[in-house]
Every structure is written in structure tokens, then in C-alpha cells.
Image (tube, grey):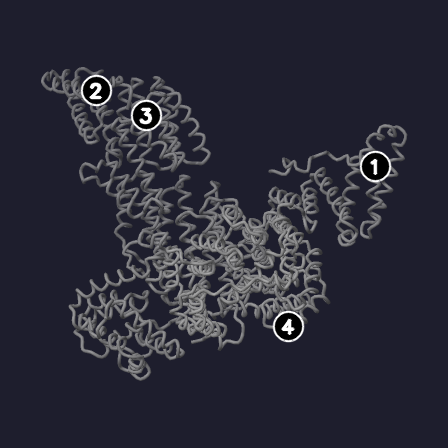
Amino acid sequence: MAALCSEFGDLLQIKKQLISVISLCKERGLLHSAKWASELAFALDPLPKDELPPTSPLTEEDAQDLDALTLAKSYFDLKEYDRAAYFLKGCRSQKAYFLYMYSRYLSGEKKKDDETVDSLGPLEKGQVRNEALRELRVELSKKHTAGELDGFTLYLYGVVLRKLDLPKEAVDVFVEGIHALPLHWGAWLELSNLVTNIEMLKSLSLPDCWIKDFFMAHMYTELQMIKEALQKYQNLIEAGFSKSTYIISQIAVAYHNIRDIDQALALFNELREQDPYRIDNMDTFSNLLYVKSMKPELSYLAHNLVEIDKYRVETCCVIGNYYSLRSQHEKAALYFQRALKLNPRCLGAWTLMGHEYMEMKNTSAAIQAYRHAIEVNKRDYRAWYGLGQTYEILKMPFYCLYYYRKAHQLRPNDSRMLVALGESYEKLSQQAEAKKCYWRAYSVGDVEKMALLKLAKLHEQLNESDDAAQCYMLYIQDIFSCGSCQEQLEHAEVSTALRYLGQYYFKNKLYDEASLCAQRCCDYNDAREEGKALLRQISQVRDQIETPSADLFAPLSNNNTPVRRVSPLNLISFTP
Amino acid sequence: MASVHESLYFNPMMTNGVVHANVFGIKDWVTPYKISVLALLYEMTASKITLPERRRLNKLILPLQQGPDLTLGQFLKTVEECCPQTAYAVKLRLHEMADGELKDMEYFFSTLPTPFTAFDTEAYKTSVVGLFMRHMLLAYNKLSFSQVYKLYKSLQHYYHSHYAKPMDGQVPALVADDSEMDLTSIEDTVGDRVDKEELDTPLHESELQGPLSQKQAEYFLARQAYLLKNDENKALKPAALQEELNNMLKFNPDFAEAHYLNYLNSMRVQDIFLSAHSLLHYFDRLILSGNDGKSNGDEGYGRSLRYAALNLASLHCRFGHYQQADLALQEAIRIAQESNDHVCLQHCLSWLYTLEQMKGSDSTVLTEDSVKMAAHFCLPYLASLGIQSLVQQGATQGKTAHKLMDALKDTDILHWKHSLSELIEISLAQTTSIWRMYGKSTMSLQQAQLLLNMSSLEPVNFGVQQNNTEGFAVVLCHLAELHAEQVCFRVLGCSSKQIILHLKEQFPPHTQHAKLWMLCDLKIQFERHMNEGKYHLAEPLVTAIAALNQTEGLYRKAQVLKALNRNTEAYHILQQLQARCEKAKCTEMVIRVMLSTAELHWESSGFSTALPVLLQALALARQHHLQSLASETILHLAFTQLMLGVPEQALNVLHEAIEPILAHRAVMDKGRAMLLAARCQMAVAGFKPNRQGQAAASALDTLNEAAAYFSQLNCKERLRDVHYLQAQLHRSLGQILESNKSAMLFRLLDQELQSPAPPVSMRL
């Protein structure tokens, strides 16, 4: 912690670095990196006048290319890439060279997009490629071996390699580029897209710079290591970036990923206050509002975003969520479709559209939407889960097992998939497997608190009364430990548990516990009669055996859970 | 061209911002190759061609239209083979377009005979050619400005990549010699490309072939699927096919059929993960297209659901996951029942009994039900499949032979009526196996030849003369074993070995049916080594056999142990094996085990204890009509009787068996039978000295015959016995010279064998 503070101690220095990198990025047309750096710079205190970093001095070459560069930059800004490249052709300065190559790259990308519409056949469309990539690669690799590339051109080289599906080479080049110019956030982001697991992340040799902490935090979020990510972000805030909207949004997304809804909501609200016209990440915010069914807030958000910019993917997703919450699923699907028109690779929208079709009972369209989501990203567990649900609705429990298993594989610690798996196994009368699933779901932390109840019912069916009672006990403890709102919500199930426990204790002649349970039963409408009946039975039996057993039961009644004590982790009884 | 701009409504089939072409019913696209084909058609209609050349060209048209895009070099070469003159004209026309301007291409399309005007030519609108031309014209007319330009560019590229250096305005095709041009130009192109793309070769292998149009892709898939089913060897290699499919799916992720082929391909390499994944993917895709189609939602869509579950069951069944398969099947049955789909239910039922059979439980009742229902719903395929399965069960359970044969004959009539070529093959293979099981080698041979000489009956065969299905593999294996039994590897230049080699070629080791010939090959080798007394060579084969078939492996192990005189171990194994086989109702093996047990009894001189075992075996063999095993048992019985001192009885019994043995059994068995007969004759003669001369002479004849058989087999141990007996007989007849000769032969063999001779009398 102390080391980190000292690293960040010189906020002044960081601010200076940021300001200089902003101007560098702007000169080269790297808008997103400039935006990120500016956001961060804005979060820091302004510099006194004499502290402002001087603009870098011009070299001889720069001076020579100045006119051409200015001309080309203006063309570039107007998206006339070929024209920009033409006028930059002879230039020798690094800056001009980067812009030259970059505009050639962008021109290729733009043409590719245009081509896609005008292709000569359905099977050709996959073949449309950025034709410039190969030439760029040849030229850049020559310069690369000669060691003539600076940080920005290395970044571009890496991007070209990545587009050519050469991830290994791309990673090397990005790392090199980051070493050459650590402050360029774009290079870090590109690298983060290529890192697939934690081992790979650890094996990278990255420069020791304050920006590395941002990268690591981002990476942890991507790799679903939320705890570590939150820790990193917390450190960054403490180090002086407390005003950064970027960090706040990232933390909020992290909380969203671990389903800590309240925290995430609070952070998003804070974010909206600080940055009311922000559209990025607002789809995540709307997801949270949706989960909490906060209609007015969602409605306000939707209207607000439409006013800002209605043709953004995020806006469309928010509106889709809004309609979905109002149960207007057709309209919701329409807006998700619109989001997909704006960006066909928008993963969330495909999945959400699948959910909408599910609501509309249009299973085949839902399957299609989920399949598309999987095509975009094979690791999208929600889409796999959605497919499983679809087939479950179609009453194909065996068929849906495959999908649930896939989802479970991707999120091994998510209880929802485990419960779904358990239910499917139960339907296939594979009780042993089902028990394993439910128990595991409980062990990883059950979100919906249903696993134990289901497990208990399963034991009840199989006449394993001890295990069933044990599970009901745990269930009741679980429900009562998490507050009154839950209690209200699920009272029907609690009463079932109490009723069963009462009967169980009664059968085992533990009358004190039985009467306790029966009394609690009376708190619930549906179990009241049975509770009373049980109480009467207990008092009858007690009358019969009154005196002789008084001292006999004394030691037992101290024991509040006299069930056969099986350690919760003892799975022997659950294996077939 | 239907582009995004025209379609304002959203389409779920949209990927990467482009609407799938299928939606608008356009399946064909103009490509440079198609233009060449059009040019060819144009030339064919326009110019005068001699009749034989025209015939050859006509034959070419369909493959050219349906096949994947060829490079110009390939295309011109194929045309040239038929008619050099037309090829030249086509080349000229293409040259005109490619080296001219855009307007030349436009002019070409405008001069094409429109199928609507040309009534009397081949290009009439309903002809194959006319249809193709119409498609092309329509597709061409729909192209937007930039697309036309792009088409022209790609035509130029297509033409010039063939003639790598069309520099200095010269027309290479017109100047240079054609054949030479072809060769050099191809090399040049390759070289050029390598130069340009040396940096990223892995990317562009796939690109060389160019994209397939919808139709071409369908044709490709259909062809490959057909080949996978009928002749796996001729299909693309698994890796190559996978690459091709990945390519296709990259271009068009909505092409559901490709996923199905992917599934089939993964099954070939036993990849459960990928095959399950592809199968489910296919059905996920299919569900939508089924819903889209003309049928009402319930029909198309529910239907594919049922079949999806059924296919999943079959997948698990193939991989031997019986429990999983059972669950999937139950699901399919439930859904089919809910929607009253009798056909699907019928399919489920036939899978159900297959599954039961694979699990090893008796499924006769289920099968019978299935056959009845299939007949009721007029599903000849399923019905006769069921009957075949019943016949198989009946054969192993010892049902009356003529009933089985009758049933097979009846189904055959059904097959020919509906031309179910697959089932005809299976039926022939089954008959071969049944005859072989009954020990009628000639009948079996005949049936095998019948199948092998039959050419493919499929309505569409992609140049496949003969199929390579399981039936063929089974028949070839039988053939190899039969040949091996007759020791044909001496006479006909190793015919059994050649058959095995052929099998190896036709069914490479990784393919589905390869296990059949592997086992067969191992068995043949094992038998040979055992016959030649090379037990140390036979021993390692046992492990290999056990890997392919556990029961067989155990049996062979017992045999080797017995041969090596480790009788206790052998006995234990045999006991174990018998219990197992009786449980599995594997009669053939039970009988063989009993025979081996009897042989073990002999070793301990327990001839009288061997008798009941042998009698039991004989009863079993007769009951199941297993003639070969019955005669083998009789051989054993006769030997036992001989040892028990009743040679007359033995000779009587032997006479009963000797005919079928000489007619149907292996050379080894023939030799053994003759040897035994000779010994019986000698023993009988020993009691009646007055008729000794005559008896000894006939015994000598028999021995000579046996010696001929054994020398054919190179079975030196038995040959040694024969020589010993011969020497004895000659001596008793007073023929000293012959006796000495035989004694010398015996001495030579004895030296060669080194192992001490076991007492002659002690074995069969």
C-alpha cells in the first residue's frame, strides 16, 4: 500500500505526462486514447501556469513536413483518408509517417465496410477483407526489424497483426509498443483484448508505470477476478484519482458482474450526477435498474438518453430494457434489433433480444438470437443459459442439459446454472446428480435461496428424513439470517419447511422443538391449521408420558438441533 | 442484388450487417468462372462442332455448372480435352473481355441468347442450359454499378492470374503454344503469389479456391455426406474436410447443413465434444428455417425438435453412452407421442431395440412390435431393418434355419421393390455370415461373391461404382478368413493377405469399420502361428485381439496357455469364459470353450470325464445347426473313443463327420480328420491280424492324404507324427525301404523341431 502511494505520490508528474500524451494523441488522430487521458487528467487538480509542460520542440524534419502534415490532418479529420495518405507520401518525420500509415489503414477499413454491403454473393461476404493490411504489414515489419518504429507506429503494427489473425506476434509488438510509450492507453486496451487467461497475463513483461495499475484492474475485471479488480481500483482512488469518472464506472461494472446490485446502483447514480450526459456504460446501469424493477428510474434514464443521442447502441439497449420492464416485449425486441443494426457485434443486445423472444414465447427466434450471441462470443454464459432455458420450456430436459453444462463450465461458481442443472436432472429422475448440483449450488452461495429447499424436497421424496430435516434447518437459518424482506417474500416456502420440521421432531419424540416449530407455523396463513393440530397432538402425548420422562428429556432439550449431525461438507451421503 | 438498403425491416438472419441472400431466393451469383462457362455455352451454340466432340462437351456441361469454381487453367484444360477448337474460342472471347474494357463484358451479356427468344436451340428456357443462362442473366441484371465494376475487376484478375505476364500488349494465348503455356503460366502464378504473400502463408490457402455459391456449396455438402456414408475413403480427409467446412461457415455462418456435415466428420474421428456441439448447433439453426418454411409452425418446428433429440440419442449410442442415449431417446419418444408423430415414434422404437441389443439385453419383443408397427405405417425401410435384426437374433438363438432364410428372402423382395440398396447389401452380408456360422463355406463364399460383384444401386452415385459400407467390410473379412482356412496364401499368391491389404486400403485404420478387419487379420495370423507351432509368435497377438474383442481374446489366451502346457491357468480362464458366454448366450463360443475344456481333460488322461462335456457340446451344436462345430465335436468324440479303446466305435462316429469336414472345413481340420481316421484304422486292424495287410494299406493311403494337408500348412509337428505312423505301418507290412525313408523324414523333422515329441497318442 505504501509503495503504491509513493508511486502515485507525484500526481503533478502524472498530470504533466497526461497533458503531453493528450496532445500527442490528438496530433495523430487517436481520439479514444486522447479521450481517456483527458478524462483522467480532468480528474486531477489543474496545474499552475508555469508548471504546464512545454510543447515538444520541432525537429528539422518536422518543420519540413509541417505543411503537408497540417493539410493531411485536416483531410484525415474529414475522413478523406486516401487523400491524406497521398499528401503524406514523401514525408520523413515520425509523426507524418504514423499518420500516413494510419490513414491507409483506416481507408482500408472503411472500404471493407462499404464492400460488405456490395459483395458479389452471400458466400463472398466473409471474404471481404481490408486489402491494405497485407501491404501495411510488409512495410511495417521491414521498419520494425530495422528498429525504426516509435510507440505509436508499433501500436499500429500490432493492430495490423491482430486484424490479420496473428495474435502471438501482435502481443509481442504491443508489449514492445507499451515499453516505448507507456502512456498510450489504446495500446494497453488492444493488449487486454488479446490476453485470455491469468497465466498469460502474469507472463507478460510490462513496464513499471502508474498506468499499469489501470491496466491490471481492467484485466482483472475482464477475467472475472472481481475481488482483485475492486482492490486495485480502491487503491487508485486512494492514490488521488477519486474524481475520475472512468474509475467509478469501472467499479460499478465490476459490482454489476458480481451481482452486488445495490453498490453498483449507488455508484451509477453518483456517476450520473458527475457526468449527466454520459452514454457509455448506461446499458449496464439499465440492466441493474431492470433487475431491481425500478420503473420510474429506468423511464427517466431512457428519456434522458434519447434526448442526448437516440442513435447509440447503449440508448437502444436502455429503451429495450425499459419496454421489457413494462412487458411490451415486441417493442423491446424492436429496440434491441435497432441496437444490432447499429452494431451487429453488440453481444448484450443479442442475448437480451433472446430473452425478449422468450417472453413472447417465440422459442425459435429466441434460439436464433442466443445462437448469434454465442457466435459473437463463445464465452457468453447468459446466452448458453438462455438456450438451456428455451429447451427446458420446450420440455426437453435432457437436451437442455448440454447448454446448462456449457454455461456452468463458463461460470463454475454461479448457483443459477447449478440449480437449473439440478432441476433438469430431477426431471430425468437422476436424483443423485440432482442432489450433487443443489448441494454445490448452496455451497457456492445461492443467490435465489432455492437450492436448499429443492434439496430438502428431494430428500423428502427419497424418504431420507434426516437429511431433509437438516436441509430445511439450514434453509430456515439462511432465510432468517438475511433480513425481513426475504422472509416476506418466501413465507410459503418457509412454512413448508417449518411444517416438515415440526412433523419430523414430533416423530423423533423431540417435543420441545416440535412445539417451537408448530408455533412458528401459526405465523403463516397456509400452515396455521396444521400448526395448531400439531400443537394439540404434542400436548396430548406430553400428558400421557408426563412424569416419567421429565428427567429423561432434560438433557436433550438443551440440544437445539438434535438431528443426526452430518457435516455440511460430508458429501458421502449424496454420492450414489 | 438485394442489399440492406432495400430491406427496411429487420431480419434475424442478418449477420455482420448483410442480409442473407436466401431470403430473396437468389442462390446463384455471377462469378468470373460462371462467365467462362457462359462463354463456353455460347460458343457451343454458335459454332459448328463435330458430333463426338459435341457429345463430350454435352457430358461436361452439368459437372461444370454444378461443381465448384475452377481456375481458368483447369477449366480450359477440361474443355480442351473434349474439343480444342472450342477451348480456343472460349479463350479468345475471355481475352476480348479481360483485355478490353467494361463495355466488352456488357456486350457479351447482351449478346447471349435469351432463353425466352430462342425456342429451338438448347438454350430454351426449360432446358438445363437455359435455366442456367436465365439464372445468370437475372443475377447479372440485378448487380449494382459498383458490383458490375467489381465483377469486371475480378474477371480481369481471373484471366490474368492464369496468364501471369500479359505484358507489352501481347496476347500470350494467341502467340504461344497452348500446352506449354499452361504449364509455365501455372508455375509463374504460384511463384508470384508466394513472393507476394510469403509473410502470411497460413492465411491464404483457403482463398485459392474461391468462395462457393449457395448451390455449389449444397452440391459439395451433399457429395461429401454421400461419400461419408458409402465410401469414406473417397471423401476428403477429416482434417481437410474440417478446414473446408470452417471456411464455408466463416463465409456463411447460417449454413446449417455445414454444421451437420461437421457433426458427421467429427464422428469419423471419434470426437464427442465437437460432434455433439455441431449436432446441437445444426438443430438450433434448423429450427428457425423449419419455422420459416411453408409448413405451419407446429409441423416444421416441432418436428425438428423431435428429430434433434433422436439424433442426440443416436450420437450417444455411437459413443457407447447407453444411459445418456436412453434418456435422450425417452425424451424424443415423449415429444413424438405428444404430437402424434407416428413416423418419428417408429424411428424411436427401432432405436430403442437397437439400444437394448447393444446393452446386451433381449429385445426380441420390442423388435417384433417395431416391425409390426412399421409395416402398419408403411415404412418399408424400418420394417425390413427390424426383420434383419430379428433374423440376427434368431440366428444366435438357434431358430430354425429355413425360417430365417425365408424371412430374409421375403425382405429381399421388399428391398428390390423399393430399391433400398443399403438394405440389400446388409441382407447379403447377413446371409454370408449366417451360412458361415452354419459351417457351409461354399454357400457363404457364393453370397460374398454376389455382394462383391454387385455394383452400386444408388440413384445418384457420385462416380462411385461400388460402395464401401459395413456390409462390404464384413463380407471381405469372411472371404479373407475362408481363404486363409483353405491355405490359399500358397496357391493364389497370398489371396487372404491381399484381401486384408485391400481392406486396409478401403477402410483405413481410423475409420469406423476398421476394427472388423483388424480382428480378422489378427485371427488369421494367430491361427497360422498356432498351426505352425510358433506359440511365442501367437502370444503377443492375444493382447491385440483382447483389445478388439474381449471374449475372443480370452479364448485365444486359453488356447495359447494350453499349447504351452500351462493347463491350470488355461482351465481357469476357460471356466470364466464359459460362465460369461452362457450369460451372454453366445453359443458358438460356449461350444468352442467346451471343446477346449475337453482337450484339457485329455491332457490329464481324463478321457471318460471329457465325454459328457463333448456330448453336451454336440447337442448344443446340433440344436443351433452349427454344422462345422458339430463335426469338430464329433472329431473330438471319436478321438476320445479311440483313447478309451473302442476304435470301431470311433471309426463309425468318424464316418459321420468326415464328409462335411472334407467339404467345408479348413485344411488343418481335414488333415486332423484324416490322421485320426488312419489311427482308428490302425487300431481296428491291430485287433484283427488276419486282415492286417488290407487295413494297413488303406491306413497308409489315409496317412498320405493327411501328410499332404499338413505339408500344405507347414505344420511340422503333425507331419512328424504322420511320418512316425507311416514308418510303423511300412514296417508291419515288411516294406523296409519305405519304412526307413519315413523314419528318416521323422528324424529330420525331429531334429529341426528340437522340442521333445509329445506322445503321439495324446492329441488330436
Of the image marks 1 and 4, the number of the one nearer the N terminus? 4
Residue marked by disc 4: A308
Q: Nearer the viewer, residue A148 or B154?
A: A148
Residue sitting at x 76%, y 54%: A489
Q: Position of residue B732 (x, y in %)?
A: 15, 15
Q: Position of residue B611 (x, y in %)?
A: 36, 23
Amino acid residing under circle 4 = Ile
Query: In whole angstroms, how far apart are the C-alphas of marks 1 and 3?
Result: 80 Å
Residue marked by disc 3: B637
The mark lying in front, picked from 1 and 3, is 1
Label 2 and label 1 in one chain: no
Residue marked by disc 2: B682
Amino acid residing under circle 2 = Met
Query: In whole angstroms, how far apart are the C-alphas of marks 1 and 4?
Result: 67 Å
Q: Secondary structure at mark 4?
A: helix
Query: In whole angstroms, how far apart are the C-alphas of marks 2 and 4?
Result: 115 Å
Q: Position of residue A259 (x, y in %)?
A: 66, 54
Q: Is residue A150 above or below residue A4?
A: below
Q: Secondary structure at mark 2?
A: helix
Q: Secondary structure at mark 1?
A: helix
Quarter that holds the C terminus of chain A: top right
Q: Is residue A313 above or below residue A185?
A: below
Q: Position of residue B482 (x, y in %)?
A: 27, 39
Residue A360 left/right relative to A480:
left
Amino acid residing under circle 3 = Leu
Residue marked by disc 1: A511
